[in-house]
Amino acid sequence: MNYLPLLSLQLTHAYYSDGRCRDLVIEPAPQTRRLLGNYRCLLKDLPDGVRICPNCGRRAPDPIGAGDAIWVSAPAA
């Protein structure tokens, strides 16, 4: 299987010397995890965010519909 980057979300803030906010963790809500799985996408952690990578194998991924929402939440520390 061949997964290629589609979208990267990086959290930054001027408070940090390098701008990277490593204090927050992006965790997809259960319905988002199912949606990403249905569209054969991986959610990869980055040091300061996440990346969504669809499976770009032999069959093209189905497009994500306009009515499909992606939800994330920040877990309590």
Image (cartoon, rainbow, N blue to C red):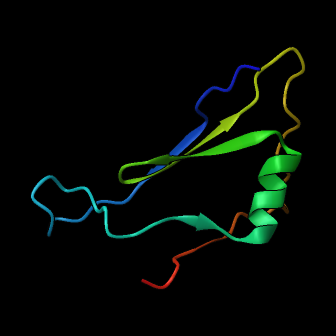
| Number of numbered discs on residues | 0
Q: Is residue 23 left or right of residue 13?
A: right
Residue 1: percent from left, percent from top:
77, 20
Residue 31: percent from left, percent from top:
81, 68
Residue 73 in view in this figure: yes
The residue shown at (84%, 40%) is: 63
Image: 38 above or below 11:
above
Q: Residue reaching furthest front?
A: 77
Q: Residue reaching furthest left?
A: 17
Q: Is residue 74 left or right of residue 3?
A: left
Residue 8: percent from left, percent from top:
50, 44
The quarter of the displayed image where residue 52 is located: top right
Q: Nearer the viewer, residue 3 or 12?
A: 3
The residue shown at (75%, 63%) is: 32
Image: 11 above or below 51:
below
Q: Quadrant of the C terminus?
A: bottom left
The residue shown at (82%, 39%) is: 40
Image: 38 above or below 69:
above
Q: Residue reaching furthest top?
A: 58
